Image (tube, rainbow, N blue to C red):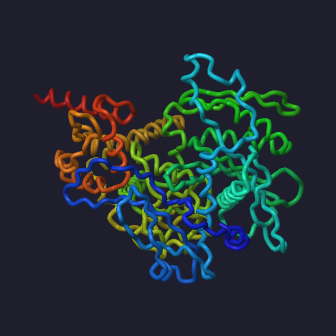
């Protein structure tokens, strides 16, 4: 991200006791029952960090370490984090950006009046047979903005500015309007994160990428961005269209952005009716389609079909990019580091590559969820996020590589076509984390993807290979959640759980995995569930595997 004029745009003071937005936020739940055995360290803690790049990066970490901000649900833990102020005593880049996002959730709680018409009667499900086709109460998106590069006041460079917004917000108090302006300004940083001096261009290939915005309570919003050269003659700077949505569905929103681009080339005025129709349309359930009618001059009325994949947990993912950039063995090394919640930085020049790889790696962890910092494209102005001591998945453009490699104890993965080596930096033990037998089984399962003819088939082959890994390592978890006769939450018997594993290498891995926050929060949810059969693809695969093991055991006898 830009460090000069953009940095000046972010000079916002944090009010006392303000609720700040954090990239490192994690979903924390109260644990009513615990069974801490075997010397496992508690790895809970909600961190919000902020920093701006200073002259001495290492000294700033040591000398100006700030304290963790913990909620009442957290244990008392502290860690050194980068400074929250710059040399002039102003709030650091992340803290300033944090302030911008502090009101995003509050906006929804206090309720703004959108300048949008109510749903038309024909758009409401008319009977129960139709209702299952849609996800009720969800809009496709919250914002569509156009971010254009405009000359600074002194005319020496360009800076990104919002030039179009839909929908506009009405009925806001003054402070709410100010907070929304900060929110929109923050979005511009992710649309043009490079931190370079832009100049007018005659050619610029369109590119689509996404980013994730994480709030202090762990809730996430997705930004879908398409950058292109606007219509016109002569040299001109590129612009970006960005959709902000709580929904994670990269393929679907990429198609929406293509339609937006098509209309923008005709006239900006053509964007509004299309987005209004989309805003009014019901969001389809997995495997279903919604049709949007839209008029285009000289083309007439078009019907745009938007279909969600049946495997909804994979609708934000395209594993093809991951395996185009890395070999199967390299993917396993990255997976091993991610499953133990380590710090991982991905390097590439293309924004689309970075965003797709980050989401693909996070998807390999299913049914577990990455709970820590995840920034698919780190703006240059926020590059000091790499100094955070907490786990993260970061995407960094290659021209910023020198600002990353002076860190230790992290995995730096080069995704470039012309790379000399894939792993620029590593801890060194990544190849020994996964049990050898299960690693071989994953590689064998991945070989079947060569036969996949569609993205959906490829995604299914890859996801099931890693899903089966978790089935074999921790799929027996439900047998070790004990419920009392009086009801109430169950209690997970951790020590008995990993002691039940026969393989020594698998047991060693599981003991490490039990210390991660992703497993801890997963098992907390299980403890809250009532005993009995459970729904979901993970539980289905566990039952299939257990049935297979029973049949194999019966044959031996």
Residue 427 in picture, x, y percent from top left: 37, 68
Residue displayed at 31% across by 44% down: 441
The answer to whether residue 525 is above or below residue 6 is above
Looking at the rendering, in which quadrant would you find the N terminus?
A: bottom right
Relative horizontal placement of residue 415, taking residue 173 as reference (left or right): left
The answer to whether residue 199 is above or below residue 318 is below
Relative horizontal placement of residue 302, taking residue 330 as reference (left or right): right
Residue displayed at 37% across by 49% down: 521
Residue 209 in picture, x, y percent from top left: 63, 51
Depth check: give the residue in front, 443 or 70. 70
Residue 547 in picture, x, y percent from top left: 25, 29
Q: Quadrant of residue 215?
A: bottom right
Looking at the rendering, in which quadrant would you find the C terminus?
A: top left
Residue 108 in picture, x, y percent from top left: 62, 46
Residue 328 visible (yes or no): yes
Q: Quadrant of residue 383?
A: bottom right
Residue displayed at 46% across by 46% down: 363
């Amino acid at each position: 991200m830009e460090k000069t004029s953009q940095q000046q745009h972010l000079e916002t003071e944090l009010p006392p006791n303000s609720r700040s937005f954090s990239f490192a936020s994690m979903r924390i739940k109260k644990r009513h029952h615990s069974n801490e055995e075997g010397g496992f360290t508690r790895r809970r803690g909600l961190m919000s960090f902020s920093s701006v790049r200073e002259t001495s990066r290492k000294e700033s970490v040591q000398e100006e370490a700030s304290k963790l901000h913990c909620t009442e649900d957290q244990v008392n833990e502290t860690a050194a984090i980068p400074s929250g102020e710059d040399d002039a005593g102003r709030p650091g880049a992340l803290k300033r950006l944090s302030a911008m996002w502090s009101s995003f959730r509050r906006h929804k709680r206090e309720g703004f009046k959108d300048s949008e018409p109510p749903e038309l009667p024909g758009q409401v499900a008319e009977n129960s047979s139709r209702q299952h086709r849609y996800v009720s109460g969800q809009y496709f998106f919250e914002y569509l903005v156009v971010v254009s590069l405009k000359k600074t006041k002194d005319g020496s460079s360009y800076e990104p500015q919002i030039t179009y917004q839909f929908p506009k917000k009405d009925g806001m108090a003054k402070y709410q309007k100010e907070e929304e302006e900060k929110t929109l300004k923050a979005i511009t940083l992710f649309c043009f994160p490079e931190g370079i001096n832009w100049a007018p261009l005659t050619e610029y290939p369109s590119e689509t990428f996404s980013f994730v915005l994480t709030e202090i309570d762990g809730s996430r919003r997705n930004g879908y961005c398409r950058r292109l050269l606007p219509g016109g003659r002569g040299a001109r700077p590129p612009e970006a269209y960005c959709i902000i949505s709580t929904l994670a569905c990269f393929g679907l929103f990429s198609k929406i952005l293509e339609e937006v681009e098509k209309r923008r080339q005709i006239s900006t005025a053509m964007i509004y009716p299309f987005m209004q129709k989309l805003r009014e349309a019901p969001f389809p359930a997995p495997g279903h389609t919604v049709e949007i009618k839209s008029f285009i001059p000289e083309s007439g009325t078009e019907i745009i079909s938007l279909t969600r994949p049946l495997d909804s947990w994979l609708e934000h993912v395209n594993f093809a990019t991951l395996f185009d950039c890395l070999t199967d063995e390299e993917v396993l090394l990255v997976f091993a580091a991610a499953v133990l919640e380590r710090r991982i930085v991905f390097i590439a020049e293309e924004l689309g590559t970075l965003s797709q790889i980050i989401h693909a790696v996070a998807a390999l962890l299913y049914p577990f969820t990455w709970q820590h910092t995840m920034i698919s494209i780190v703006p240059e102005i926020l590059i000091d996020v790499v100094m955070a001591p907490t786990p993260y998945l970061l995407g960094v453009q290659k021209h910023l590589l020198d600002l990353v490699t002076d860190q230790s104890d992290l995995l730096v993965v080069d995704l470039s076509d012309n790379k000399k080596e894939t792993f620029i930096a590593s801890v060194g033990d990544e190849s020994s984390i996964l049990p050898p037998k299960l690693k071989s089984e994953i590689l064998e399962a991945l070989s079947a993807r060569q036969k996949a003819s569609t993205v959906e088939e490829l995604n299914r082959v890859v996801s099931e290979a890693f899903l089966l890994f978790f089935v074999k390592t921790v799929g027996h978890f439900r047998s070790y959640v004990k419920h009392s006769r009086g009801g109430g939450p169950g209690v997970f018997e951790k020590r008995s759980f990993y002691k039940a594993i026969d393989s020594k290498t698998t047991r060693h891995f599981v003991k490490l995995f039990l210390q991660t926050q992703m497993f801890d929060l997963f098992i907390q949810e299980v403890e809250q569930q009532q005993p009995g059969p459970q729904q979901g693809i993970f539980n289905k695969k566990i039952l299939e595997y257990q049935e297979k093991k029973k049949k194999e055991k019966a044959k031996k006898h």
